[in-house]
Image (cartoon, grey):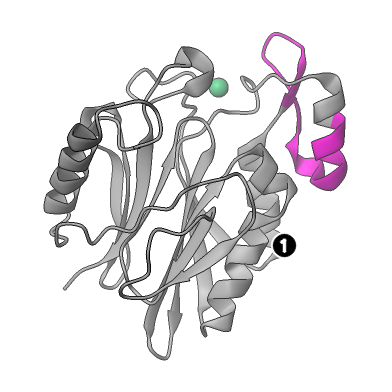
Amino acid sequence: MFHWRADILPGVSAAFTDAGAGNLALHVGDDPAAVQERRFRLEESIAAAPGSLRFMNQVHGNTVAVMSTGSPAPEADAMVSRGLPLAVMVADCIPVLLAGESGNGPVLAAVHAGRPGIANNVLPAAVESMKSLGASGIRAWLGPSICGACYEVPAAMRDEVSALVPATRSVTSWGTPALDLPAGARAQLEAAGVRVEHSGPCTFETETLYSYRRDRNTGRFAGLVWCHD
Ligand SMILES: [Zn+2]
């Protein structure tokens, strides 16, 4: 069920699911009841109450939603909370989990960082939001995503994105223009004073993970961050 799972702060854990957890997204044509059942199983596996994991309606923007008890699923690509469990869904984009300490306990974030999100600074926006809640010592865990040697794009798109985030400029293993989203995310996070603790493998090259580029009609896996006793 989990590709990776770790304790990241005292009382805080993070994980990235794999295809064994099944598709966790409602927007890809899957049976909604089956998706809901998989989300419940996932919550059970991290000892979270049913329905407590917060998912967002991801739109490739840079809106950050500050979540509190009772907040509906936001239309956003980043969520920040004072400890409420958060989830982000992906299949090639980067699921980024962040955590920092504050005087009121941990501050968490889950971010959907794809090409538009990286270009539009969704990660720095999430870090700013965490700091506004008092977080310091913020660290980041990057989940599996398509790598800079696999993510082929038209030359004009590489030029456009790398003009904004130079670290994204890349070449595929077969010699064509590409974007390296994990390198771009790392550069943006480090510029915001955030240490990157983990970076996952390439989805396109890992059969146990969903990859939109590889399979098109595919599910979504998830990044999760949550508090526990
Ligand atoms: Zn790759």
Provide residue 4's location: percent of width, then percent of height. 31, 42
> Could you tell me the amino acid type at mark 1?
Ala
Residue lying at the far bottom of the rendered structure: 103
Residue 42 locus on image (x, y percent):
19, 46
Return the residue at label 1. Answer: 191
Q: Quadrant of ligand 1?
A: top right
Residue sitting at 33 percent across and 58 percent down?
54
State the image quarter where residue 73 is shown. Answer: bottom left
What residue is rendered at 49% in x and 27% in y? 202
The quarter of the rendered structure image containing the C terminus is bottom left
Q: Position of residue 48 (x, y in %)?
A: 17, 61
Q: Is residue 194 visible?
A: no
Residue 161 on the magenta segment: yes
Residue drawn at point x = 50 percent, y = 64 percent:
139
Closer-to-camera residue (211/187): 211
Please provide percent x and percent y for residue 204.
49, 20
Q: Secondary structure at mark 1?
A: helix
Q: Magenta residues?
A: 159-178
- Left or right for 103, reference 208: right
Task: Name the foreground residue: 62 vs 163.
Answer: 62
Residue 41 picture quarter: top left
Q: Is residue 175 shown to the viewer in this render?
A: yes
| Residue 158, magenta (yes or no) | no
Does 84 sit left or right of 108 as displayed? left
Q: Is residue 216 left or right of residue 219?
A: right
